[in-house]
Image (cartoon, grey):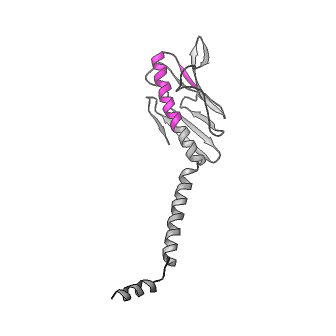
Amino acid sequence: MEPLRARARAARPRGFTLIELLVALVIAAIAIATVAVNGWPGSQRGLRFEADRLAQLLALAREEAQVRGRPIRLTADRQGYRFVLLSERRWIALVGDEQLRARTWDAPTVLEVKRPDGGREVEFGRDAVDVPFTIVLARDDASATIVANGLGFFEVR
C-alpha cells in the first residue's frame, strides 16, 4: 500500500493552477486599489477635512466670544484664515490661543459667506442668538458648505 501512496503523491502536479493564480491576482488588485483610493488625499477629501475643522473652530469661537464678552470675527483669504478679537475699536489677532490661532489652507481655497441680512462677515458676540449664515469653501473642482443656524449648531454638507 505504501508504494501506491508514494506514486500518487509523485504523480500529482506541483504548483498553482491558473485559476488559483487569477484569484490571488484579483484579491491583490482589490487590496491595492482600496489602499490607493483611501491613502491619497483628493481635493474633496481634503476640503471636507478643512470644513469639519473650521466648523468646530466656529463653535469654539462663538463660545469664546460669549465668555470674553467681546466680538470675535473670522477673516480669511486664499491662503488661510484666522480669528480676530475686537479690542478698543480695533480688530486684533487672537494671540496665545492655540485653538483659534491663524491657520493656512492645505491648498488655495476661496471662502464665501452668505447671510440673510446681506452681510459678508462671520462675527460672534455676547448674544446667545447670532445671524444664521452659510460658508462655502471652494477649491479646484471641490466644494463644501458649512451651515450655521444662529444657535450654535454648525453642519458640514
Number of numbered discs overlaid on the protein picture:
0
The residue most toward the top is: 88
Residue at image point 51% right, 30% down:
57
Give yes or no for residue 95 being in the magenta stretch.
no
Q: Nearer the viewer, residue 95 or 66?
A: 95
User: Which residues make up the magenta segment?
Assistant: 52-74
Q: Quadrant of the N terminus?
A: bottom left
Front position in the image: 93 or 77? 93
Residue 120, given in percent of the width and then of the height, sits at 60, 29
Q: Residue furthest left?
A: 1
Q: Is residue 37 above or below residue 107?
A: below
Q: Position of residue 56 (x, y in %)?
A: 48, 32
Q: Which percent across, then down, holds residue 111?
A: 61, 35
The verdict on residue 55 being magenta is yes
Picture residue at 52% right of the left edge, 35% below the top: 53
Residue 31 vertical placement versus 83 (above, below):
below
Main secondary structure along the magenta-highlighted residues: helix
Relative placement, left or right, of 51 versus 67 is: right
Q: Position of residue 137 (x, y in %)?
A: 59, 39
Residue at 51%, 63% in the rendered image: 30
Looking at the picture, tell me which residue is in the foreground, 91 or 33.
33
